[in-house]
Image: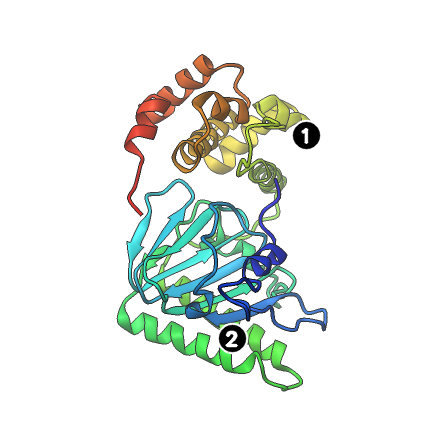
Amino acid sequence: MQPNSLAAFYAACAPTPETPAGVLPPPDMTQGVGHFNVFPLADLRGAPPMPFTRRAYHKIVLCRSHSRVEYADRDPHSAPNTLFLVTPRVSYRWLPLTETPEGYCCLFDDAFLLPTRTGVAVAELPIFQPEAYPVWEATEADCVAVEAIFDKMARELPSNYAYKYDLLRTYLWELIHLVQKLQPVPARLATHSAAERVTTQFADLLDRQFPRQSPQPPLRLRTAADYADQLAVHINHLNRVLKETTGHTTTALLSQRLTQEAKLLLRQTNWSISEVADSLGFADVAHFCTFFKRYAAQTPGDFRSTAVFEI
């Protein structure tokens, strides 16, 4: 299934009997500059609860009030002054725990943020990588600094300034680099080796398989051989490249991701264990249970019974 689109986001915020004026109208983006929007979280009051899934756009959120962020297979984060970033590669859900949430949010797509002069695209930054966990509680000083940029964006978006999108793009890069500095992570050096290209292609193929939205059809690519065939390389070459660049074999990387996705499905859906097994391409429930216990140190049933969190 495809990630939820921007159109789906605005459709969820459309007028209803409870909100006849609509919750959040989309901005006028008719000049072919991609999509960008910024708004106070209070504007989402009355919007329906969001599903746990990926989105086909990027998001940066500062929530001043109590809220709950469920991100990938990590434990939920519940706190005020929460700052988090979302990439199209990762499933998440944000749940406000107050009637009127406080803070800011901005949405943007890849088309709005073209690579900089140095050739760096937003998806290459460490905080937007699938393995990153860009959800944390910010200090008061950090919140004030982030809010100042959001406020500049919010005042500029409705203006008639001829170059406002260039200015908004500048503000957005300022915000991205500020929040990246607030959560230091090891920088990734760009490489263009054949091994890096194969690793990136493998990661992209793997990301496209998830999240699972229904038990059927099962995963299209399930084994190391499936990925090698899709990438038109020998399986031994793929194993060697991934071991060199990641420290793990193809099978180990697939097992890690399947375990992660199994945990998400067991925690976030009411599918039966058999349906979870089918969705992830296991031949039968027994095979899935053996696999899951090996990598999660629990049976699927035991994990599900202990992975319930109060909202």
Image quarter in which the N terminus is found: top right
Is 10 above or below relative to 296? below
In the drawing, does residue 294 fall left or right of residue 249? left
Q: Which mark is residue 114?
A: none
Q: Quadrant of residue 230?
A: top right
In this rendered view, identify the residue nearer to me: 274 or 248.
274
In the drawing, does residue 13 fall left or right of residue 286? right
Q: Position of residue 218 (x, y in %)?
A: 59, 26
Q: Quadrant of residue 229?
A: top right
Other residues around mark 1 within 10 Å, as few (<14) / some (14–19) / many (≥20): few
State how the image is colored.
rainbow
Q: Position of residue 99 (x, y in %)?
A: 35, 63
Is 206 above or below relative to 124? above
**Residue occupied by mark 1:** 230
| Residue 2 seen in the figure | yes
Q: Amino acid at mark 1?
A: Gln
| Residue 120 seen in the figure | no
**Residue occupied by mark 2:** 171
Q: Position of residue 10 (x, y in %)?
A: 58, 61
Q: Quadrant of residue 102?
A: bottom left
Q: Decide which of tag 2 and tag 1 comes sooner along the chain.
A: 2
Secondary structure under the numbered disc 2 in the rendered image? helix
